Amino acid sequence: MVALKKTSEMIQVSFHVDESAANTFTQSTVDVQLNPLDNEVMLIYAVDFDMAPPDAIAGVDSFVIVSASTTSRTTIGGINSGNVLASANQEIRASGFVDGGVPFTNENPSAPVGAGLDYVGILATSDLHIQIQGGNNAGAKFVNGRIYCQRARATSAVYAALVQSEALSM
């Protein structure tokens, strides 16, 4: 018996998260409405972020960082954490400059292109969590995003293991 059986075509789930105030960690939840009675899970293939750029302030380093995780977090996560599916940051290095500085962007691959992998993660509960935080910005920032995913049904044993693993990865 196959442990995971795909039950839908590819789905795109879009989201938008505003920082609650400038330079403040903010988290929002995206409910993908899985059916636990049918052992339904979500196979995550990619996460794309489109975030507001940091403010270019002469002599000040600024940044905007975002992440998407399978469990709630109290900080931005990196892909070194088991519950983080994707992360990205934009920085402006202006410390010591009289102008707006130099911009840098870093996005951890939203999908393992060319790696031959089927998906980047599995969501076993209905909630996907999106985090954002800016630093040294004059105003609150935002992130728009899209999750490329597919619904699947797991065997009872696999579903139980996925739910427990997700709960323990906090």
Image: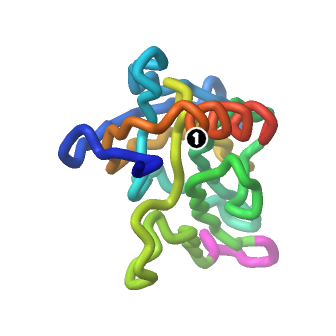
The amino acid type found where label 1 is placed reads Val
Residues in magenta, as a range = 95-101
Task: Name the quadrant containing residue 47.
Answer: bottom left
- Seen in the image, is 107 located left or right of residue 93? left
Structural crowding at the residue carrying mark 1, measured as other residues with C-alpha within 10 Å and reported as few (<14), some (14–19) or many (≥20): some
Please provide percent x and percent y for residue 147. 37, 46
Quarter of the image where one finds residue 61:
bottom right
Main SS type for the magenta part? loop
Res 62 quadrant in image? bottom right
* Residue nearest the viewer, comparing 110 with 11: 11
Mark 1 element type? helix
44 and 137: which is toward the camera: 44
Q: Is residue 27 left or right of residue 13?
A: right
Figure check: 128 above or below 86? above
Residue 115 within the magenta-colored segment of the rendering: no
Residue position marked by numbered label 1 in the rendering: 158
The image position of residue 10, as x and y in percent, is: 22, 48
Q: Quadrant of the C terminus?
A: top right
Residue nearest the observer in this picture, 89 or 116: 116
Which residue is at 54% across, 34% downward? 124
Q: Against 12, is 29 above or below?
A: above
Q: Say whether residue 58 is left or right of residue 103.
A: right
Depth check: give the residue in front, 12 or 54: 12
Q: Is residue 98 above or below residue 45?
A: below
In percent of the image, x 68 and y 65: which residue is there? Answer: 58
Q: Is residue 131 visible?
A: no
**From where the camera sits, is residue 154 visible?**
yes
Return the x and y of residue 17 as percentages of the image width and height. 49, 32
